[in-house]
Image (spheres, rainbow, N blue to C red):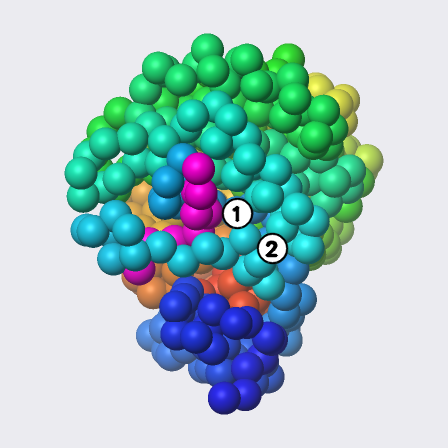
């Protein structure tokens, strides 16, 4: 078996999360490009500029690990369950080659902490235990970490607090630590309640000299190198457009922590005044976006925690450009049709699902696709990110 990267879990047949690990990487990019082109066959592609796919590192590219906790409190297993129904068929993935090498040593310390704090792993079959997941995120600029324990209840909080000082002594790179309370017996990753054990509540990151922040319950891309180039590409495209027709009013819908809007507004502000409105349903992500705007000194910026579609449908003013970065379901017919009627000069569409994006583009008939590029955010899988620029034909 010839693998793109060495992985003992794939070779043993115990983990198949990377479905394409036996596919040469050049072939992976070709297959993704072909899939993207197939989705867009019904779209207007006259004079469409296809840029070459932006590749990813093949290993150690993830900044986040989501580990199911199983096994026993004395010998916890951090990884995945191959059969969630029995709660015991676990695979330890602490040495997964997708994670930074530094994560392995961190996980060993966390296993010891689990035992010391008496955090009994949650058994799905028996519906007993406390600790469901460990979520670990690294800042690539500083190496500092955000650690979250997803628990069924607050019962173990006193024991965690008792052992916490020793944990921080062993892992001084821990910047943000929290407990997330998820009481449901359901396939739900996290609950609404977050209990912080540290004074800091967000992890600082930096893409292209734009400060960004990662906070519990806020979305952030898991492949920093590729995400950095994705945002830089959007910024460059917007600056090129601005040289032809000034862009002074931006909407950033489904904005997350503000990566797209902040990159564009910060660059435009050097040339003229610009108004940015960012909309995201997650309050945690909006807090992060606001911190970034403040750090950048952007004045005419508003980030609001709202449903993006509901916000847009209530507006009467017309921005020069709308940026959309929706979840896998896309922006949907209602919002797509509204944007078609609103007729902003430009729409910048970033998608993690080309199938739903193609459906949305079908409602934007008055727009010409001008540029498109695939970003391989998820190597060794069929998933990818795509960025496309739409220009109103009359513009």
Name the residue that disc number 1 marks.
65
Foreground of the two, 155 or 138: 155
Characterize the local packing of mark 1: few (<14), some (14-19) or many (20 or more) Cα atoms within 10 angstroms: many
Asked if the magenta segment contains residue 76, the reply would be yes
Name the residue that disc number 2 marks.
99
Foreground of the two, 270 or 386: 386
Q: Are the residues tagged 1 and 2 within 8 Å (C-beta)?
A: yes
Q: Where are the magenta residues, as a range?
A: 74-82
Give the image location of residue 211, x and y in percent: 73, 33
Q: Residue at x 65, y 35 (%)?
A: 145
Q: Residue at x 39, y 74 (%)?
A: 13
Q: Residue at x 32, y 20 (%)?
A: 153
Residue 252's label in the rendered image is none
| Magenta stretch, main secondary structure class | strand
Question: Is residue 205 something one can see in this rendering?
Answer: no
Sequence-first disc among 1 and 2: 1
Characterize the local packing of mark 2: few (<14), some (14-19) or many (20 or more) Cα atoms within 10 angstroms: many
């Amino acid at each position: 078996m010839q693998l793109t990267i060495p992985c003992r879990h794939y070779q043993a047949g115990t983990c198949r999360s990377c479905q394409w690990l036996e596919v040469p990487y050049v072939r992976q990019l070709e297959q993704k490009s072909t899939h993207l082109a197939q989705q867009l066959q019904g779209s207007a592609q006259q004079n469409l500029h296809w840029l070459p796919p932006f590749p990813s590192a093949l290993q150690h590219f993830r900044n986040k690990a989501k580990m199911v906790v199983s096994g026993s409190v004395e010998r916890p297993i951090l990884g995945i369950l191959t059969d969630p129904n029995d709660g015991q068929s676990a695979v330890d993935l602490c040495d997964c080659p997708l994670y930074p090498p530094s994560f392995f040593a961190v996980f060993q310390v966390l296993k010891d902490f689990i035992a010391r704090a008496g955090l009994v792993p949650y058994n799905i079959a028996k519906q007993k235990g406390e600790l469901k997941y460990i979520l670990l995120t690294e800042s690539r600029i500083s190496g500092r970490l955000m650690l979250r324990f997803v628990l069924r209840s607050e019962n173990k909080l006193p024991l965690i607090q008792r052992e916490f000082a020793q944990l921080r002594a062993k892992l001084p790179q821990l910047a943000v630590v929290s407990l997330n309370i998820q009481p449901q017996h359901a396939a739900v990753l996290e609950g609404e309640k977050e209990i912080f054990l540290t004074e800091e509540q967000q992890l600082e990151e930096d893409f292209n000299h734009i400060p960004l922040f990662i906070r519990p319950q806020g979305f952030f891309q898991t492949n920093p190198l590729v995400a950095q180039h994705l945002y830089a590409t959007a910024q460059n495209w917007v600056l090129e457009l601005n040289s032809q027709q000034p862009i002074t009013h931006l909407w950033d819908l489904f904005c997350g922590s503000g990566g797209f809007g902040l990159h564009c507004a910060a660059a435009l502000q050097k040339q003229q005044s610009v108004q940015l409105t960012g909309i995201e349903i997650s309050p945690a992500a909006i807090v992060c976006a606001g911190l970034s705007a403040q750090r950048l000194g952007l004045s005419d910026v508003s980030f609001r925690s709202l449903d993006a579609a509901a916000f847009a449908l209530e507006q009467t003013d017309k921005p020069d450009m709308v940026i959309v970065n929706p979840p896998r379901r896309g922006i949907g017919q209602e919002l797509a049709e509204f944007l078609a009627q609103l007729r902003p000069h430009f729409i910048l569409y970033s998608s993690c699902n080309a199938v739903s994006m193609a459906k949305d583009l079908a409602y934007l008939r008055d727009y010409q696709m001008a540029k498109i590029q695939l970003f391989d955010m998820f190597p060794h899988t069929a998933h990818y990110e795509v960025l496309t620029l739409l220009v109103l034909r009359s513009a």
